[in-house]
Image (cartoon, rainbow, N blue to C red):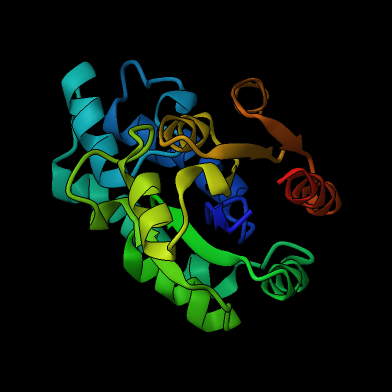
Amino acid sequence: MDAVLFDMDGVIVDTEDFWRAREREVILPAAVPDDPPEQDEIRGINYRETYDYLADNYEVVLSREEFLDLYESAAEDLYESADLMPGFEDLLADLRERGCGIAIVSSSPREWIERVVERFDLDVDVLLSTEDVDGPGKPAPDVYAIAAERVGAAPENCVAVEDSPNGVRAATRAGILTIAYGGDPEAVDLADHEAADPEALRRVLDEVMAEQ
């Protein structure tokens, strides 16, 4: 295995519960008050693309600017207070000892990714937001295909760690082996492997690398 590609929210930093609660309780009811969509419809999708999706499929009452501000204002403090997932720094160190390339592949804006990397001084080779890609974001494969190229590895020699179904779909469509992290049932069904917690993730990565 030449490289490990990590999603960020819910995989590297413990923010997924916050975002899911904020979307469920604040953002979606504000945007579509009469008939809010199921939250899983938008999970793992860049929030700017989420607005386009909602506008195409629902009666949205917020302007694009108002909608985006609900996310951006919440993110201002979140990434300064969110915790790193337990054991993640040690996991990165172990992967480095094995000679693995490391990428973060996220639907979050690049500014948010950089904030996390700088705050925790994470040793990674590539930071890639879906906003950096000239094409659709997750679940399309573009962002993962580009991440593999930039980290210098063939897709078949990479593994992606994702917690959302759309993230797993994106990596799979790029020809990358997937690990569903955190136990989302749909993501688990779609992925090649599953890991419910940090210890399981380390074990699964060991097994995957031993098979290569």
Residue 80 visible (yes or no) = yes
Q: In this image, 128 relative to 121: left or right? A: left
> As displayed, is residue 108 above or below residue 174?
below
> As displayed, is residue 173 above or below residue 109?
above
Task: Residue 126 in the image: state x and y as whole percent.
Answer: 43, 68
Task: Residue 113 in the image: state x and y as whole percent.
Answer: 43, 67
Q: In this image, 27 relative to 187: left or right? A: left
Q: Residue at x 41, y 59 (%)?
A: 74
| Front in this rendered view, residue 164 or 154 | 154
Task: Residue 69 in the image: state x and y as whole percent.
Answer: 26, 55
Task: Residue 174 in the image: state x and y as whole percent.
Answer: 41, 36
> As displayed, is residue 150 above or below residue 34?
below
> As displayed, is residue 204 above or below residue 89?
above
| Front in this rendered view, residue 36 or 188 | 188
Residue 76 visible (yes or no) = no
Q: Residue at x 37, y 21 (%)?
A: 36
Q: In this image, 209 relative to 42: left or right? A: right
